[in-house]
Image (tube, grey):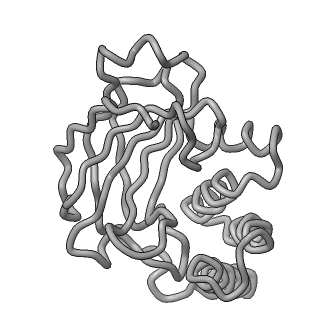
Amino acid sequence: MRVDLTARALKIAPNEPQALLLAGAAARERQDFAAAADYWSRLLAQLEPGSDEAKTVEAAIGEAREIATARAGGGAPAGATAASTGELAGEVMLSGKLAGRAKPDDVLFVFARAEEGPRMPLAAMRATVADLPLNFRLDDSMALAGGRKISDFASVSVEARITRAGNASTSSGDLFGRIDGVKPGNRKLRLVIDQLQP
């Protein structure tokens, strides 16, 4: 579901940053490292040179290309099949008081990010309002290669955001819910979308 929605978003807007980020993460998850590097290269072109986000993406591209090259030569990079860590899981639901403000095809993002520092997600998934209530899972395997992971932090913020714009940028009228101080390994999260972005 997440891959199909991301592919659809890229058809509509081929260079939408959040869609490129998710497409690269999905490609890495299915071990298509060459495709991951391609998506992230397109994302890098839109980032401010030298920024924390750009450095993270550059590291991701470098690692993905190294793995792709090693695999083409028959090698298997260390850690490429390591079990994922930093898992967060639970259920996202929409508050009844806001149900009338959302349409079934509105885009839903669920993501984790550091409580301080760069705002780029540590892990993210994409769905639609029609999928609610949604059981979700985020973990280190969904992170940018070479970048920061959920397990790098003692606690993170987990947010669900409904947007008609189709991207993860905050916009007036978005519906969202957030839980701060979430410790990696928590699999019983109950995330309620109950706030309206001013």
Using the rendered view, name the quadrant where residue 70 is placed: bottom right
Image position of 144 (left or right of 10): left
Residue 32 is left or right of residue 177, and the answer is right
Q: Position of residue 157 (x, y in %)?
A: 30, 58
Q: In the image, what residue occupies the spot 21% across and 74% down?
A: 154
Residue furthest front in the image: 198
Rendered location of residue 151, percent (x, y): 30, 73
Q: Residue 71, can we see it?
A: no
Q: Position of residue 197 (x, y in %)?
A: 45, 37
**In this view of the protein, can residue 32 be seen by the observer?**
yes
Depth order, front residue of 173/113:
173
The residue located at (33%, 35%) in the rendering is 135
State which quadrant residue 28 falls in.
Answer: bottom right
Quadrant position of the N terminus in the picture: top right
* Residue 32 or residue 164, whichever sits in front: 164
Q: Going 59% across and 76% down the picture, which residue do you hit? A: 53
Q: Is the residue 129 above or below the residue 171 in the image? A: above
Q: Is residue 157 left or right of residue 155?
A: right
Q: Is residue 49 left or right of residue 126?
A: right
**Total of numbered circles in the picture?**
0
* Location of residue 15 with respect to 164 vertically, above or below: below
Residue 60, position in %: x, y? 61, 79
Image: 160 above or below 14 = above
Q: Tell me if residue 173 comes above or below residue 151 in the rendering.
A: above
Q: Residue furthest top?
A: 100
- Residue located 54% across and 17% down the image: 104
